[in-house]
Image (cartoon, rainbow, N blue to C red):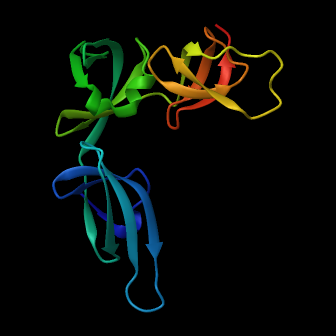
Amino acid sequence: MAYDITEIRKNVKLLIDGAPYTVVEFQFVKPGKGQAFTRTKMRNLITGSVIERTFKSNETLEKADTEERQYQFLYPEGDKYVFMDTKTYDQLYMGADQLGDARFFMVDGMQIDVLFWNDKPIGVTPPTFVELRVIETEPGFKGDTSTNTLKPAKMHTGATVNVPLFVNEGDWLKVDTRTGDYVERVKR
């Protein structure tokens, strides 16, 4: 299956030079003279490297045959992370390099989407929001909510999140996994 250049959007998965890429940014340009073209910035789904390419309006691009499957994250084991298919109970092992920063937002037992290309796991997508516990941060000050001053806080998964001054060790926070930003405190 192929994509026409007009179908290129953010997060579209393409096959470029035999490797799967996802579109990070795109810009359609129609100059006063000459042929229209699309400028793209794409990230390799295996290596994480970013490339920029320009495509003419009459070109077609091959769709990367990727598939997302629902797995349950079980636990980290050394430098590997263990996932389980909840239908077949098959276990899958992935390295930290395959997971990238997503590994800092994974909690034992969480449902997670695993991306496959040619039946090989190449990455994961955690839920948009996760609840994490603060294990290390500077002491908070009661009533100090008037400014937008932030401080770093280390979470129990290893992530470091910038949080407001009133957050203390032991607090549970809702964190956006797409950006790594603090959303709110949650009661547990």
Residue 72 occupies which quadrant of the picture? Answer: top left
Q: Which residue is drawn at 47% across and 24% down?
A: 159
Left or right: where 187 falls relative to 131: right
Q: Residue at x 30, y 77 (%)?
A: 58
Q: Where is residue 156 shown, x and y percent of the image?
A: 48, 13
Q: Which residue is drawn at 35% across and 17% down?
A: 73
Instruction: Say which of 78 and 45 sits in front.
Output: 78
Residue 185 occupies which quadrant of the picture? Answer: top right
Left or right: where 14 falls relative to 169: left
The quarter in which the C terminus is drawn is: top right
Residue 66 occupies which quadrant of the picture? Answer: top left
The quarter in which the N terminus is drawn is: bottom left
Position of 187 relative to 112 (above/below): above
Left or right: where 175 falls relative to 109: right
| Residue farthest to the front, as pictured | 138
| Residue farthest to the bottom, as pictured | 33
Instruction: Say which of 81 and 112 sits in front.
Output: 81
Q: Where is residue 60 shown, x and y percent of the image?
A: 27, 68
Instruction: Say which of 98 and 115 sits in front.
Output: 98
Q: Can residue 183 be spotted in the picture?
A: no
Q: Where is residue 81 shown, x and y percent of the image?
A: 28, 18
Q: Which residue is drawn at 77% across and 16% down?
A: 141
Q: Where is residue 87 shown, x and y percent of the image?
A: 29, 16
Q: Can residue 172 be spotted in the picture?
A: yes
Position of 62 relative to 147 (above/below): below
